[in-house]
Image (cartoon, rainbow, N blue to C red):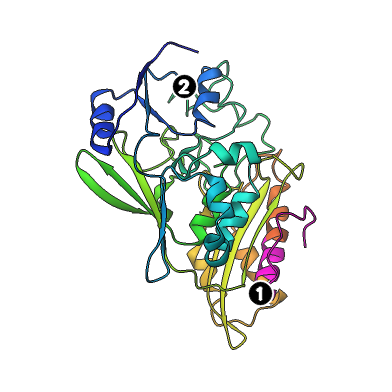
């Protein structure tokens, strides 16, 4: 690990100034990802800006039923808060499906959004990686691809976003509040994470001198018709092979709206609004679910070692839709899949 300067701002304005003055700086909160990257010499910031003194550790339920969750609220606090479990059970379930209790106690809301890919080539400085060194090439392409993307890939990168929490936030239509020297702005969650394109070194649309203040989540319209299902190599402390957050708004036996996001399949939590429209007006059932899964994954392309993900993802989507329609969400304390 390289030497670095350490800054601990006491206000948001001070944190913004510190970022603007030191472009190579990195923000640290829980440190569950950044510290690992520094240990592996994947990242070597010259300055660390510790934001743990900032007033970003609370979440509020607004009068309309929406939530505003501060950037420094820990994953554990969100997952176990009674009001979150009551109003946003899809979010709580997704968080509990990820990491370990120890990591969830330290990991923060903003840190979860900003975690880097767990691609083994990205973590190995001896290999070529366009994320670490733009223009150097992608060692994953033609390499070991079992954990890699099947949707939205590019010739520059086939890595996947590792978060469980973000898959739920995508389905919940969250908004990310950020602030920088030019002021505050809101980023719809669908626009926050990027596809790799020819700039895979940029995971998000967050500017280098901006910090996340909070996420806002509108009132949930799904009731009990939701689920988060995660398939992985082992049932604890493992990243998803494929995962799905599903929410259905069902009235009089007909689907009024649907939100389906997948993890483990792309550089960002993946949604397909056109495929979701196929479910609107349909009676929940296997015929509609299979047709949706086929459309959702119509552009999926394997890299050899991850070809199995395409039929696996298709089956997972059908299973998750079936759970959500029945109002029997996956219980994260029960490691068997319903």
Magenta stretch: includes residue 327: yes
> In front here: 189 or 12?
12
Is 255 situated left or right of 130 in this image?
right
**Residue 158 in view here:** no
Q: Residue at x 47, y 29 (%)?
A: 131
* Magenta extent: 317-338
Q: Residue at x 28, y 23 (%)?
A: 22
Within-10-Å neighbours for mark 2: few <14, some 14–19, many 20+: some
Q: Is residue 193 above or below residue 285?
A: above
Residue on which disc 1 sits: 325
Q: Is residue 282 above or below residue 191?
A: below
Question: Residue 80's spot in the image, x, y percent?
Answer: 59, 54
Q: Residue at x 54, y 42 (%)?
A: 161
Magenta stretch: includes residue 312: no
Question: Residue 302's spot in the image, x, y percent?
Answer: 65, 44
> In front here: 123 or 6?
6
Residue on which disc 2 sits: 43
Pick whichever of labels 1 and 2 is earlier in the sequence.
Answer: 2
Within-10-Å neighbours for mark 1: few <14, some 14–19, many 20+: many
Is 331 situated left or right of 107 in this image?
right
Is 234 situated left or right of 263 in this image?
right
Residue 93 occupies quadrant: bottom right
């Amino acid at each position: 690990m390289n030497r670095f300067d350490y800054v601990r701002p006491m206000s948001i304005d001070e944190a913004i100034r510190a970022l603007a003055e030191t472009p190579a700086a990195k923000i640290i909160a829980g440190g569950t990802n950044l510290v690992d990257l520094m240990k592996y010499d994947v990242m070597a910031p010259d300055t660390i800006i510790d934001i743990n003194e900032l007033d970003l550790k609370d979440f509020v339920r607004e009068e309309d039923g929406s939530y505003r969750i501060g950037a420094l609220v820990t994953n554990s606090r969100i997952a176990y808060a009674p009001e979150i479990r009551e109003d946003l059970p899809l979010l709580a379930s997704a968080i509990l499906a990820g990491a370990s209790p120890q990591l969830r106690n330290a990991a923060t809301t903003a840190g979860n959004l900003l975690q880097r890919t767990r691609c083994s080539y990205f973590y190995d400085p001896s290999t070529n990686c366009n994320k670490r060194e733009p223009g150097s090439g992608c060692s994953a392409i033609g390499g070991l691809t079992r954990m890699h993307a099947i949707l939205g890939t590019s010739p520059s990168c086939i890595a996947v976003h590792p978060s469980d929490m973000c898959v739920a936030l995508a389905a919940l239509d969250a908004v990310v509040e950020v602030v920088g020297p030019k002021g505050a702005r809101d980023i719809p969650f669908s626009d926050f994470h990027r596809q790799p394109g020819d700039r895979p070194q940029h995971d998000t649309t967050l500017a280098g001198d901006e910090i996340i203040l909070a996420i806002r989540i509108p009132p949930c319209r799904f009731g009990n018709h939701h689920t988060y299902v995660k398939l992985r190599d082992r049932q604890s402390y493992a990243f998803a092979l494929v995962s799905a957050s599903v929410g259905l708004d069902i009235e009089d036996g007909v689907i009024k709206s649907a939100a389906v996001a997948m993890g483990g399949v792309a550089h960002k939590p993946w949604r397909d609004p056109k495929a979701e429209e196929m479910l609107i007006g349909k009676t929940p059932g296997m015929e509609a679910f299979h047709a949706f899964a086929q459309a959702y994954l119509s552009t999926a392309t394997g890299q050899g070692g991850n070809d199995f993900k395409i039929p696996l993802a298709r089956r997972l989507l059908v299973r998750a839709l079936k759970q959500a329609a029945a109002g029997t969400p996956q219980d994260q304390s029960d490691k068997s899949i319903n």
